[in-house]
Image (cartoon, rainbow, N blue to C red):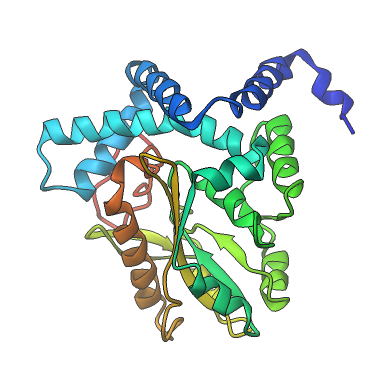
Amino acid sequence: MLNIKFIHPKFFPTWILILLMRVGVFIPFSTQVIIGSTIGKVMYPFMSKLRSTAYSNISHCFPEKKQSQVNALVKSHFEAIGISLFETANAYYASDKKIIKLLTTKNEHFFKDALKQEGGIILLCAHFMPLMLGSRALLINHTIANIYRPQNNKLFDQAMVKGYKNHGAVMIKSTDTRSVVKAINNSLPIWYAPDQDLGEKNSVFAPFFGIQTATASATARLAKNNNTRVIPYSFIRTKKGYEMSFEEPLQNFPSNNPVDDATTTNMILEKQIKKTPEQYLWIHRRFKTRPEGAKNFYKSN
């Protein structure tokens, strides 16, 4: 039911965006990529702050790259951002038939075998640009819980939550720890991406691309509940569509050492990112929280 507060003029641009998203899902994949890439190229010159963040992240994570190579990767990343507008639309409004047509799945048996056993499951993933669509693709054959951060725009947040719930997702706010643990204890698989800078609280410093990085310690804490298996999961765009892949559940995880556990998860995500670096979320200030005495990576806080 429509909330009357969303009729306010300040939400008109969001309504237009939602309309465009609903129409955009009918555009063929190859055309979505062309249009999205063009949007990214148009955005690139005007997003100086995000462009600077992406450049700093990439140059620190790939110190072997020359300046021209870093610039080229930043430009490719902005094209991926433009394409992600369609990928988000597909996540909310596309039919299962369209998604299945574009989907290639690898090693799903790791996930299916875990589902046959008692215990919780954490699908460990990184913030790739098609990640929202990856969550939706999982819902085609499975019931999962999405751990998400509410959007600042309340109307868009409602559209996101409704889009996933309409396809069977259980939506849990990232701050609702009790519900996350409850889902794990009920053996409901959770889709979890811990690769963001959440500050020093509830984080430990562990290497990520060789950089001491504030890493969420929640993955290991959650995995201590209900014989939980942690399964690395990735969803990336290919030339013909999308590849959804699973890896073998982590062994001897968690340990009794939070730094070792954070190092393990960071290494997994780092390996995934290196396959398609342009599709990773480089515009996030991943290294904003620094160890005491370490240099700030960014021009301003």
* Residue 76 placement (x, y as % from top left): 29, 32
Residue positioned 39% across, 33% down in the render:
80
4 relative position to 81: left or right: right
Check the picture and name the quadrant holding the C terminus: top left
Residue positioned 72% across, 68% down in the render:
178
| Residue 140 visible to an observer of this rendering | yes
Number of numbered markers: 0
* Residue 217 placement (x, y as % from top left): 47, 68
Q: Foreground residue, 125 or 24?
A: 24
| 11 shown above or below 277 | above
Residue positioned 32% across, 28% down in the render:
51
Q: Foreground residue, 122 or 142?
A: 142
| 122 shown above or below 50 | below
66 relative position to 88: left or right: left
| 254 shown above or below 41 | below
Q: Foreground residue, 138 or 48?
A: 138
Check the picture and name the quadrant holding the N terminus: top right
* Residue 278 placement (x, y as % from top left): 31, 40
Q: Foreground residue, 105 or 38?
A: 105
| Residue 174 visible to an observer of this rendering | no
